[in-house]
Amino acid sequence: AFENLDAVLRAEGGSLDSIVRLTSYFASADDYPIFKRLRPELLRAPFPASTGVVVGLLIPGMLIELEAIAVRGSGRALSEGGAAGDGG
């Protein structure tokens, strides 16, 4: 799922580092610990705001669906004392 998301973001000039909001839909709550372990390997601090929801996914065999809001440029970069997205 993250590979697909990264490909879409890169096609538009972004990357996983561009994500400011991530919603993760899980087929089973049992998958959340795996996601939580992998997330820091795929995303860097400051981590995007996020929500995880357990739902019945429409495609058989699908374990997770990701929905992301991303910014272009360096909008997510932080400087000392700044906040995400304020360019500070």
Image: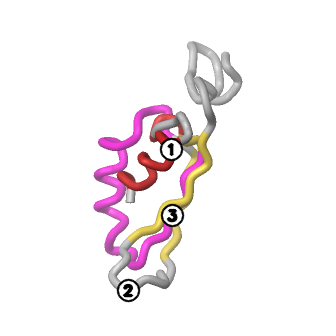
Is 38 magenta? The answer is: yes
What residue is shown with label 1? 9
Name the foreground residue: 42 vs 51: 42
Q: Position of residue 19 (x, y in %)?
A: 54, 42
Q: Quadrant of residue 71?
A: top right
Q: Residues within 10 Å of mark 1 (few under 14, many from 20)?
A: many
Q: Is residue 44 left or right of residue 67?
A: left
* Mark 3 or mark 1, whichever is nearer to me: 1
The span from disc 3 to disc 1 (Cα, nearest Å) is 20 Å
| Label pair 1/2, CB-CB below 8 angstroms | no
Q: Residue at x 43, y 46 (%)?
A: 6
26 lies above or below 45: below
Q: Residue at x 32, y 74 (%)?
A: 30
Name the foreground residue: 6 vs 49: 6
Secondary structure at badge 2 equals loop
Q: Position of residue 60 (x, y in %)?
A: 38, 86
The span from disc 2 to disc 3 (Cα, nearest Å) is 20 Å
Inspect the image, locate mark 2, and give the three-letter code of the amino acid beneath it: Pro
User: Which quadrant of the rendered structure holds the N terminus?
Assistant: bottom left
Name the foreground residue: 51 vs 16: 16
The magenta segment: 21-47
Inspect the image, locate mark 1, and give the three-letter code of the amino acid beneath it: Leu
Inspect the image, locate mark 3, and give the three-letter code of the amino acid beneath it: Gly
Instruction: Of the two numbered discs 2 and 3 on the same chain, state the one appearing first in sequence.
Output: 3
Q: Residues within 10 Å of mark 3 (few under 14, many from 20)?
A: some
Q: Residue at x 58, y 29 (%)?
A: 76
What residue is shown with label 3? 52
Instruction: Of the two numbered discs 3 and 1 on the same chain, state the one appearing first in sequence.
Output: 1
Q: Is residue 80 left or right of residue 85?
A: left
Task: Report the residue that reaches farthest toward the top.
Answer: 80
In the image, which disc is placed on residue 60? Answer: 2
